[in-house]
Image: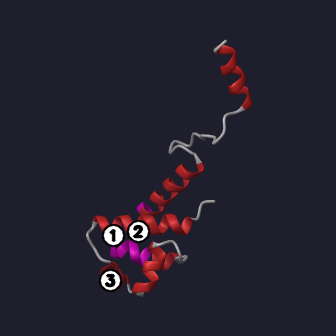
Amino acid sequence: MVLVRQEIGDVLRTHRLRRGQTLRQVAARASVALGYLSEVERGQKEVSSEILASVADALEVPLSVVMREVSDRVAAIEGIYLDDTYIPDTVPDAFVTEASLISR
C-alpha cells in the first residue's frame, strides 16, 4: 500500500539535503516546529497543504515541483510509467500463452 505521507516526506528530505540545510533551518524558515517537520520527513505525520506550501517555500522549491515528484514516485510504486502507460505487476494469461507457443 502506498502511503502518500511517506513519499511527501522523502521528497522534502531530498530537497533539504540537496540544499545542504538542516531540519532546524528549514523549520525556522517555514515557521514549523522542528519535531513536527522531522515527523513529516519520516512519513509519520500528515502535512496540511498550508504547511507543505510553507516548507516548499522555505526550501525555495515550487510547490508544484514537490507535488509532481510525489506524484511520479506514487506512479512508479503503482507500476505506471510517467507517460501514463500502465505496467502490470503480473503477466496476463494471454501473454503467457502466446509466449509459450512461440518458444515451441
- The residue at the point 36 percent across, 74 percent down is 57
Residue projecting furthest to the left? 20
**Residue 67, position as x, y percentages in the image:** 48, 62
Q: Residues within 10 Å of mark 1 (few under 14, many from 20)?
A: many
Determine the residue located farthest toward the front in the rendered image: 104
Left/right placement of residue 55 relative to residue 46 reads: left
Q: Is residue 90 above or below residue 55?
A: above
Residue that mark 3 sits on:
24
| Distance of label 2 from label 1 (alpha carbons) | 6 Å
- Residue 1, picture quadrant: bottom right
Numbered disc 2: secondary structure: helix
Judging from the image, what secondary structure is the residue with disc 3 in? Answer: helix
The residue positioned 52% from the left and 76% from the top of the image is 47
Q: Which mark is residue 12?
A: 2
Q: Are marks 2 and 1 in contact (CB under 8 Å)?
A: yes
Residue 22 on image: x %, y %: 30, 77
Q: Which mark is residue 16?
A: 1
Q: Magenta segment range?
A: 53-65
Residue 64 on the magenta span? yes
Task: Identify which amino acid the numbered label 2 is placed on.
Answer: Leu
